[in-house]
């Protein structure tokens, strides 16, 4: 027999004043504190308590541009991949011929398999699987499939964004965080040495200019054009505006999107506009 008491007992959140008598509501609520979703784009460390907040963020603040990831085994480093990213097909072709001794006439098919489509069209990158996956469908459907796929890693496997491999840099999100933490710790040390009489917090010195980014794991080290990196990130700036589609979906950064990812239609006069004054 089930006890009546257990169904009427109030559940209390141990992190805030929220209470409820339904376990599933409490689980949902606690997820908001855990913020299990993290932005998967490089140089952004935002976290979110719900799938919809995370999706909204990635759709309004970033977009995935087309790129190619070299899937050739790295020289002398089997079974690791070369993993260099290319933002132009021709550059990747040249790389295959020069660095991996491939013959230009045979690489077409391979080049296509290594292509990550703009906003997940045809193929998308999963930084948890650390591979390129095929998306079914086109347009909104394909992009949605990416979110669903990543959500499963987060919800079912408990994966966190720290272990996400950024395809644009072949670096874990967590590695970036460590770099930041090191700088913070160094500052703390400086603070301690600078006289204890003054208890006020130490001002953060501006971040030192980065020395050239850690080299990709290949013999050749042509740097990625800064313009390519910029277009990858496409972060919104103050004064940018976004479309809110008449189907209710959005916001979509105007300088990036001409059609709605949810309904697939181009933005029209019934759609509205949202000013994005400052970063979230
Ligand atoms: Zn709470
Ligand atoms: Zn982000
Ligand atoms: Zn390569
Ligand atoms: Zn995956
Ligand atoms: Zn729409
Ligand atoms: Zn419309």
Image: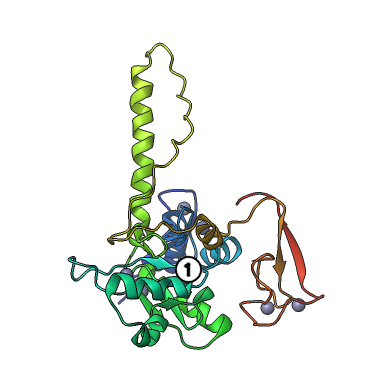
Q: Residue at x 38, y 29 (%)?
A: 187
Q: Residue at x 54, y 86 (%)?
A: 138
Give the colour scheme shown.
Answer: rainbow
- Does the beta carbon of the residue at mark 1 sit less than 8 Å from ligand 3? no
Task: Report x, y in % for residue 148.
Answer: 45, 76
> Which quadrant of the view contains residue 75?
bottom left
Q: Nearer the viewer, residue 176 or 154?
A: 176
Q: Is residue 103 above or below residue 126?
A: below
Task: Report x, y in % for residue 104.
Answer: 36, 82
Task: Report x, y in % for residue 158.
Answer: 33, 65
Q: Quadrant of ligand 3?
A: bottom left
Q: Nearer the viewer, residue 127 or 223?
A: 223
- Mark 1, residues whose alpha carbon is within 10 Å: few (<14), some, or many (≥20)? many
Q: Residue furthest top?
A: 197
Question: Would residue 199 be visible to someone looking at this image?
Answer: yes
Q: Nearer the viewer, residue 99 or 152?
A: 99
Identify the image quadrant of the N terminus: bottom left
Q: Secondary structure at mark 1?
A: loop
Question: Would residue 130 be visible to someone looking at this image?
Answer: no
For residue 105, side relative to residue 232 (left or right): left
Q: Which residue was labeled with disc 1?
A: 87
For residue 76, side relative to residue 195 (left or right): left
Q: Is residue 127 above or below residue 116?
A: above
Task: Report x, y in % for residue 207.
Answer: 46, 36
Q: Is residue 4 above or below residue 262?
A: above
**Count of numbered labels shown in the rendering:** 1
Q: Residue at x 42, y 63 (%)?
A: 168
């Amino acid at each position: 027999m089930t006890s009546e008491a257990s169904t009427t007992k109030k559940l209390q959140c141990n992190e805030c004043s929220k209470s409820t008598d339904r376990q599933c509501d409490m689980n949902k609520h606690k997820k908001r504190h855990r913020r299990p979703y993290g932005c998967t784009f490089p140089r952004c460390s935002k976290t979110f308590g719900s799938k919809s907040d995370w999706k909204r963020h990635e759709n309004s603040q970033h977009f995935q541009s087309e790129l190619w990831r070299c899937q050739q085994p790295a020289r002398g480093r089997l079974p690791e991949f070369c993993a260099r990213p290319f933002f132009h097909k021709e550059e990747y072709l040249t790389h295959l011929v020069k660095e991996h001794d491939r013959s230009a006439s045979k690489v077409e098919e391979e080049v296509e398999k290594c292509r990550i489509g703009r906003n997940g069209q045809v193929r998308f990158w999963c930084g948890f699987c650390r591979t390129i996956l095929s998306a079914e469908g086109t347009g909104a459907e394909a992009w949605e499939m990416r979110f669903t796929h990543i959500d499963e890693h987060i919800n079912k496997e408990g994966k966190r964004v720290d272990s996400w491999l950024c395809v644009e840099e072949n670096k874990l999100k967590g590695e970036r965080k460590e770099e930041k933490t090191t700088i913070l710790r160094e500052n703390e040390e400086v603070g301690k040495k600078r006289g204890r009489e003054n208890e006020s917090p130490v001002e953060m010195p501006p971040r030192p200019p980065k020395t050239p980014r850690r080299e990709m794991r290949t013999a050749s080290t042509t740097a990625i054009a800064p313009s390519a990196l910029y277009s990858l990130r496409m972060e919104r700036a103050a004064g940018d505006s976004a479309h809110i589609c008449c189907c209710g979906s959005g916001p979509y950064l105007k300088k990036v999107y001409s059609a709605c990812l949810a309904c697939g239609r181009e933005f029209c006069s019934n759609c509205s506009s949202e000013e994005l004054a400052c970063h979230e």
